[in-house]
Each structure stands twice: as C-alpha cells, then as structure tokens.
Amino acid sequence: MNSNLPLKSTAKIFNFECSLTLKVIDLHDFISTGEYGNKYCLKLDGNPDHVGDILNLEWGAIIIMKGFSYEGINCLVIYDLSMPEIVSSGDIISVSPNGIYVSYRKKSNSNVLFVTERCNHNCIMCSQPPREIKDEWRINECHAIIEFIDKNEKVLGISGGEPTLLGEQLIDLIKHCKNTLPSTQLHILTNGTAFHKMDYVEKISQIEHSNIIWGIPLYGSTPQQHDFHTQVKGSFNKVVHGIYNLASKGQSVELRIVLTRSVLVNIRDIMEFILWNMPFVNTVAMMGVESTGYAKSNYELVWDEIESYIDNIYHSIKLMQCSPINVLLYNIPLCKLPIELHNIAVKSISDWKNVFYEKCESCEKIELCGGFFNSHKTAKFTSKEIVPF
C-alpha cells in the first residue's frame, strides 16, 4: 500500500522565461468556476484540439499530456511530465526550466510553507540538514502560495530550516496568513531559541493571530542532553526561556520530543521536567526518528528500536496524562506500540513520504495506522519484525 506521491516531476518546458508559481485548474473546474488568468495553469488530460477558444484565453501555463500537439499555444507549455499523476486541479505548482514542483497539494493533509534552508542549529538527527545559501526567494514564493490556498484549509505548516531566522519577514508572513486565511491554523516548527528575546515575542503577540501552534523540540531535561542534540552550546537555556516568554503572551506550544537513543534512555526524566517546569504547554508529542539526513549518517548516535524502551514510554505517557497536557505519538506505526497507546498515535507522516510494507496489507488496523517513512525501507531501520494485527 504505497499511496505516496512525490512532489517533483521533470517535464519539457516551452516558452519558458522565468520561474512561476501557478494554481492548477482542469477543464471541469474551469467550467464550474470560470477562473482563469496569468496566475493559473490549465491542465488538459485530453487532446487540446477539442477545447477550442479556451486555449486563446490568458493563461500562465498549460499542461499538455504526451502525445498531443502544443503548436499554436503562445503561453508557457508544460509537456511530457514524467509523473503526470502528481498534480491535480487545485494544486499549486512552481515551474522551473526542467519541470514542476508541487508547493501545495489540495488533497494533502500535510501542506507546509518551506521558508528557508538555513538554520542556526545542527541537530544530530535532522532529516533536512541545513544549508547556508541565499534563498530569500522562498519567502516571496510563500506569499504567492498563500494567495491561492483554499480558504477552508484547516492547518498550514510553516517550516525550514529555522523560520525565525527570517525575523520581520516571518512576522509579515503570519500577518498575510491571518488576513488571507483567517480560519486556518498555523503549525510553525521552530527551534524556539529566538523567543528568548521578549521584543520578538511581543511583535508576534501584537499580530493577534488566535490560532498558532509553535512546535518546539526539547531533547533533554538538562543543558548537556539538549545541547548535545542541537550541537549548539546554550541552546537549552535559550529555548526554555523562549517557551516561558511565549506562554506569558498566551501562545500555544507543542513540545516535540524526538525519540533518539539518548532521549529514549532519559524519557522519564524529560517528562518529569516538563510536568514540573512547563505545565502550561498544550501538547507533548513523542516523535519517531525519520531515518534520513543526519539521522542516517549519525545512525549509531541516533537510532534505537522503541520496543526496547516501551515500558519507559508507557509509564511516561501515563504520568503525563495525569495532567491537563495533551500527549500524542507521531511517526510510530501501531504494531510498535501497546494497544493501550493506539488512541494517541497520530497519522502524522506527510503523505508524499508515507509508505506501508507488503506485510501491512493484511493488517486489520491499516486504515488507522500512520505507517512508515519511505526512508525506513532499509534493513538497519527495520530490524524488528512487522507483525500485522
């Protein structure tokens, strides 16, 4: 059961002048809504000769399937997609000279604005290792994407890299989301250290966006444990200070506990630290490791099977559930957990990197299960036998 679709497809691009961000619309939706213009990409699944004068309207681009003629089309033409199935009406795409990238997928449960590749931490398990590059263009692209997103979108992620490195530009992006997508919850992933400066938290608070969750990692109950993971001395003190500052302004915080080997060993101490020192946080999410990026190269430091620590995890969760804090499990398939914890296991893996194994096909709980990262499909990351229910 591999329903994941990649986000990229190569294609032949004709009449290309510059990179574009466009909203895809097919003939059915065009006829229903009448929407067209230079910000739209018309997707044709059949022979373009049959659509007549529609091709003469102003379009930003037209997608034509292999085998059909594109002669006489004056706008940008996307032709011979290597994976035409990755894009559907309502999606938002970025067009480059070599193909397309799906920036927003209408039917996805995990759309994210990726604002930068830069980061001021170097976490040992990071699935997307940072790069010190000039990528200011990303924030402009994110603003363009926001204008196209469905107004009924329930949740929109903002991630990086480290979004707070954008400073005022992140604040402007949040304002744009508030004005354009007022009912959409923002789930912003950040290392949280920028919030140790109260003036930055004040500026965020003044936006008065009522539906933001700040997803902030905590890797230990001591500076040594946390800073070991981030590879930045002093990061523990800054993030703890930042979490207090956010809470003082009524901001919602989700603590993200990535279950590395060291975290698994210390999970009880970490949960007790949170209960005693941060009882005001909204959610604690224990997260399985994504086995790519630095997690792959730091395998010996990062990886361990959670089954070996399941008693500690279970008792830590039961302890946390005695408080008002919501406890969730991310990125962990149900067959790795005791049945008593299945009700808090969330289907959290982004659909484009979510897979199931052949043995999963017969499992009675497959529809409830979050499955695996596609990067787990190597022997050393699946050493324990999968036993379907």
Image (cartoon, rainbow, N blue to C red):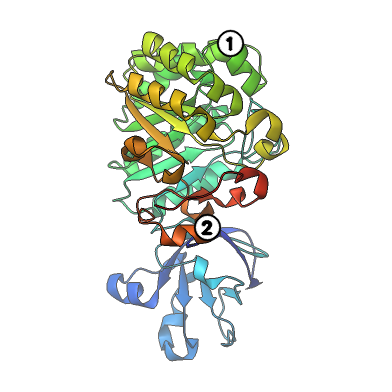
Q: State if disc 2 and disc 1 touch (CB < 8 Å).
A: no
Q: Give the image quarter of residue 343.
A: top left
Q: What kind of element bears circle 2?
A: loop
Does 154 appear above or below 198? below
Q: For mark 2, what is the residue?
A: 357
* Number of disc labels: 2
- Between 207 and 311, the one nearer to me in the picture: 311
| Residue at image point 65% right, 36% down | 295
* Secondary element type, mark 1: helix
Is residue 129 at all visible to an observer of this figure? no
Where does label 1 land, which residue? 223
**Relative to the observer, which residue lies in front, 143 or 90?**
90
Q: Characterize the local packing of mark 2: few (<14), some (14-19) or many (20 or more) Cα atoms within 10 angstroms.
A: few
Q: Give the x, y percent position of residue 363.
A: 40, 57
Q: Which amino acid does label 2 sit on?
A: Tyr
Give the quadrant of residue 274.
top left
Q: Is residue 128 left or right of residue 185?
A: right
Measuring from the top left, give residue 190's x and y in whole percent.
51, 29
Tag in front: 1 or 2: 2
**Could you tell me which residue is drawn at 47 percent across and 39 percent down?**
158
Closest to the observer, 346 or 341? 341
Could you say which quadrant of the image residue 79 lies in? bottom right
Q: Which of marks 1 and 2 is nearer the N terminus?
A: 1
In the rendered view, would you say 328 is above or below 23? above
Q: What residue type is labelled 1?
A: Pro
From the top left corner, tell me how far across and down residue 51 is, in percent: 42, 87
Q: Nearer the viewer, residue 282 or 105?
A: 282
Q: Which residue is drawn at 29% across and 70% down?
A: 33
Distance in Å between CA atoms under marks 1 and 2: 39 Å
Q: Is residue 125 left or right of residue 37?
A: right
